[in-house]
Amino acid sequence: MKSKQGDKKSFISKLLTKYRLVLLNDSTYEEKTSFKISRLNVFSALFALMFIIVLITSGILFFTPIREYIPGYSSTSLQKQANLLSYKTDSLRQIVFLNDQYINSLKKVLTGDLETIQYKPDSVVYKDAMDIQIIEKSKEDSILRQLVDNEDKYNLANINKDKDFYLLTSPISGAVSQNYSIADDHLAIDISVDIGTSVKAVSNGRVILSEWTTQTGYVLIIDHGNDLISVYKHNSKLLKSQGEIVKQGEIIALSGNSGVLTSGPHLHFELWSEGFSIDPNTLINFE
């Protein structure tokens, strides 16, 4: 027990024992300076130096841009940039998705690979139709019905009451060489004209496609709003570019005989609404 106490006192005494550190000139042995130190002073100084080094290093790492180089540690600005890039990436994905849908729709319009629909003045069926009494038609009644049908052929109000289509004009003057026919898979009107005849816009709108295709030659497509699109194929020259605004009756192209699927100089004209083909005769008088 006494031995342990003696060792403890001996260790403490060693820590507190004073030593003199003398600095001498190596040549003359002249004393330059001297210090009184102890082991405790040396340990305290080393500890203080280590503490200062750790404090300075921590300050540099936490309060300077150097911390950004530490794995797993990111700055606020980097987090903001990462969030902004994430939002932009998501927006770009949405834009690409919508553009893909738009391009696919244009491809279907060009190839005619879509469902068709015909608008007829007598296509509206009322809910109370079952309550109407069936009346036997007379000859005079049939004649009257035929006259009304002919008068209303170009009445836009009877084509589709849910759509506010503009009054359309004929895109070109000429003889109709082939009419609209679902049975023959010809979802357009072909108008025979000389090459170079002016092709006009049937209504106000914006050009959404002005391009060359192998099958249909020079093609121009106009979006007229209200989900109505007009298509002009087999042209010899296009006078409008994609994105341009056109007015009704404005010359947009020159007719021709371009493309593999052409059978002679003519204008191949189509109308589409919401992905459905429309018989142009129901909206335009080609006579």
Image (cartoon, grey):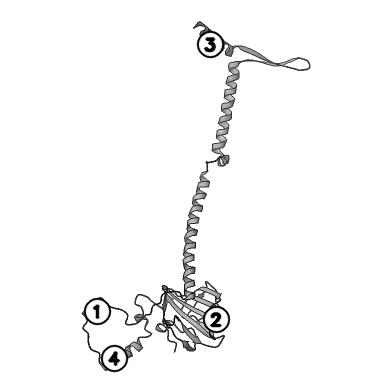
Q: Horizontal and vertical percent for residue 149?
A: 33, 87
- Per the image, label 3 sits on a secondary structure element best described as helix
The vertical placement of 5 against 195, above or below, is above
Mark 4 residue type = Ser
97 vs 218: above or below: above
Side (left or right) of 41 relative to 188: right
Identify the residue at horizontal 48%, vertical 56% (top origin). Answer: 90
Q: Is residue 50 above or below residue 266?
A: above
- Quadrant placement of the C terminus: bottom left
Identify which residue is drawn at 24% across, 79% down. Answer: 129
- Measure the alpha-carbon separation of dots 4 and 2: 43 Å
Dot 1 and dot 4 residues touching (CB under 8 Å): no
The type of residue carrying mark 1 is Ala
x and y, in percent, of residue 130 in the image:
22, 79
Q: On the image, numbered disc 3 is attached to which residue?
A: 8
Q: Quadrant of residue 146 in the image?
A: bottom left
CA gap between label 2 and label 1 equals 47 Å
Q: Earlier in the sequence, mark 2 or mark 3?
A: 3
Distance from label 1 to label 3 (Cα)?
115 Å
Q: Amino acid at mark 3?
A: Lys
Mark closest to the chain's N terminus, 4 or 2: 4
Residue in view at x 54 percent, y 9 percent: 7
Which one is earlier in the sequence, the residue at label 2 or at label 1? 1
Q: Nearer the viewer, residue 64 or 161?
A: 161
Check disc 2 and report the residue beneath it. 235
At numbered mark 2, what does the secondary structure look like: helix, strand or loop?
strand
Residue type for callout 2: Asn
Residue 142 circle label: 4
Q: Which disc is residue 129 wearing?
A: 1
Q: Residue furthest top?
A: 2
Circles 2 and 1: CB atoms closer than 8 Å: no
Do the residues under discs 2 and 3 have CB atoms within 8 angstroms? no
